[in-house]
Structures are given as structure tokens and as C-alpha cells.
Image (cartoon, rainbow, N blue to C red):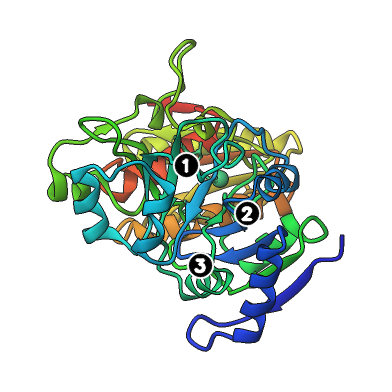
Amino acid sequence: MNTVIEKTGETDIDMQIIRQAAAIIQKGGLVAFPTETVYGLGANALDEEAAKKIYAAKGRPSDNPLIVHIADPGMLNPLIKEIPPVAEKLMKKFWPGPMTLIFRKSAAVPKQTTGGLDTVAVRYPSNPIALALIREAGVPIAAPSGNLSGKPSPTEGEHIIEDMNGRIDMIIDGGTVGMGLESTIIDVTETPPMILRPGFITKEMLEEAIGEVDVDPAVLHKPQDGLKPKAPGMKYRHYAPMADYQIYRGETKKVAEAIIHAANEKAARGFKTGIITVDEHLNLYSEQLRSDVLVVSIGNLKNPETIANHLFKVLRNFDKENAAYIFGEAFSEDHVGQAIMNRLTKAAGYQVIDL
Ligand code: TXA
Ligand code: MG
């Protein structure tokens, strides 16, 4: 398939491109577009044939439901049965923005969009390109992250082109996204509400707004046999680089020593090997480390948002380097750290070594 690729900025949106993309959505086609979190792969959420095409383009199992994107609060009511009071509070505080709420769905939303579930995930993004596209299309847009299933989510135009060129009708390249991690997902059909996927809107921020919230145990732990994560997507291998990636957790110096030892051993055997650290610890990886080991800073500890911003790009770059092994540091699980460690732990296939 020939994919139209067009670039537009967020502040000077080229409406001709938006109109072209909206016409594709209305005709049941697929358009990838930037949001403030990651790039999405969009189709008309109310058109079951269009929803099916999303699964095919991503290579995604069809029991994994899609998030429906709206461009004003008025688009919500036709999609759902009721708005629980906690949801009202959250919507007022965090929409538009990186928060997805799970509601009981109305008959208008096809089961193809919700992976067969009776609930629907809805998000009102803040990215002006995403908003312009939804408004121009005049329909809610179902959009998973625009990566091929299992790969790290796309956070740059280059990533979405890499994964989707030739597979969909159009890509809107809006450059690098602002946040770099997918939205926080909260199930508000439950009491207390439950975080199914952590994100930039943290547990602490949610609790300040509505009181107690639970966190799905599958967020940071390997789902045990019989313990099913509430977000179907969380059960799949995800965000995974091609390399074998191990995370070391413990006292900083000990962690660096263990990582250097492990990386040197793999590199000596001829394997392309990488290390993920932070700005503050770069100096720990100079002396005893072989020069052929690739050391990458993922951001800085003073401002953990920088780690979130670069996370998927760093994982993708290791694929480009054909890395066979990656050794990385663990980070704090407070605030946005919970989302960071959720993605890294899954990327590592739960290989976290406590020292
Ligand atoms: O930031 C984001 O949320 C991005 C951008 C494009 O908006 N989208 C995104 O979609 O991350 P996706 O499909 O990659 O992840 C959606 C997650 C999956 O784990 C899925 O299982 C879960 O949301 N989900 C969707 N609908 C659900 C539902 N009704 N109940 C439980 N989990 C649901
Ligand atoms: Mg995804």
C-alpha cells in the first residue's frame, strides 16, 4: 500500500493535511497521527471494518481493545452508559490530557473496537494535531499506539514511518511528541477506581483528586498464572527491544560494578552490548569498562520526566545498533517512576536482578 506522509507543526497546523487525513478516516481508512503521549494509529471508532484494519496493520491480537479518542467532552455521552461521579472529577481535572478512562460502553461502540469487552476506554488528548483531526473527521477515533505489536511505542515521526510506512493510508509526521509514555489508564467502573496502566498522571495526583485508588498488581509484577491483568494489552510481551535486557536494582556503586562485569563478559565474547544509565552516573562507567560497550544515558534523575521522554527512543536505538545484550539501572517507582519502571520491566521481560 502507498502511504501518504505529510509533515505539520503543532502551532502552525496545515489544515489541508488535516482535511485530507479526515477524509481518509471518514472513508474507513487508517491514519497515524501524533498525540502528546505517543503516536497513535487511528480509524473511525464506530466503523467495525476500520477497527479490524488497525489490528491487521499492527499485527495485534484482536482481543486487545483500542482507546477511543474524542475532541470535546460532548463526544463522550453517546459512547458510554453512565459517567460515575469520580470520573466527572477526573475529567474536569485532567482532560484534555494523558488520561484514559474505562466506562461501560453503549451499543454505538462496536465490539471490534473494544476487543469483545462491554467496556470502552476513552481519552480526550491535548495535542492540537490530534484534536484538529478528530474534529475535522467528526467521529471518535480509535487509536492504539502506532508501533508494530510488541515493539516500543513511536515517539518520533521517524519511528512511526519505520513501523507503518506501506501498511496504512497516511502518516501525519508532527515531529517528537512531548511526553513519550502512553496515557494513564484508570478503570472508573470499579470502586475504588483502579490504575490499569501508569503514566504521567500519577497515582499521587489521582489520589489527591479523588481519594483512594488501587493499582492493578500486573503493573509492576509478572502476571502469575491465573492472575489476569485487567488491561488485556498488559499480558503481551511489550515495548521489547530485540536484545536480551536485564535490569539491576540496588545501591548505585554496586549496580554499576555488576553491570560493568556483566557487560564486559558479553562484549568479550563478541556480542554487541549496551548499558542504560543516567547523566548523573555516566562517570561510573568509564574506567573498567571495555571500550566497545555502548553506554547510553536515558535522562537525568533530577528530572525523571526526561527518562520518560527518551525511554522508547533509547530502546529503539539499541535495535538499530543490533545490540544482543542490554544491562540497565532500575529507578525509583515514585510518581512518574511507576510508569517508567512499568515500561522498562516489561521491556526486560521482567528480568530484574536485586543486588
Ligand atoms: O497514550 C495513549 O494511550 C496512546 C495514544 C495513541 O493515545 N494509546 C495507547 O493505546 O497506548 P494502546 O492500544 O497501545 O494501549 C491501550 C491499552 C491496552 O493495554 C489495552 O488492553 C487497554 O488499553 N484497554 C483498552 N480498552 C480497554 C478496556 N475496555 N478495558 C481494559 N483495558 C483496556
Ligand atoms: Mg501500545
**Residue type at the position of mark 2:** Gly
Q: Which residue is mark 1?
A: 343
Q: Mark yes or no: residue 131 visible.
A: yes
Q: Residue furthest top?
A: 226
* Ligand 2 contact, mark 1 (Cβ < 8 Å): no
**Residue type at the position of mark 3:** Val
Question: Camera-side residue: 56 or 106?
Answer: 106
| Foreground: disc 2 or disc 3 | 2
| Foreground: disc 2 or disc 1 | 2
Residue 2: x and y in percent read 86, 65
Question: Camera-side residue: 344 or 149?
Answer: 149
Residue 312: x and y in percent read 55, 53
Q: Which residue is mark 3?
A: 177
Q: Which mark is residue 146?
A: 2
Q: Say what secondary structure mark 2 lies in.
A: loop
Q: State whether residue 265 is above or below residue 283.
A: above
Q: Quadrant of the N terminus?
A: bottom right
CA–CA distance between discs 2 and 1?
16 Å
Question: Camera-side residue: 142 or 320?
Answer: 142
Q: Mark yes or no: residue 261 visible.
A: no
Q: Residues within 10 Å of mark 3 (few under 14, many from 20)?
A: some
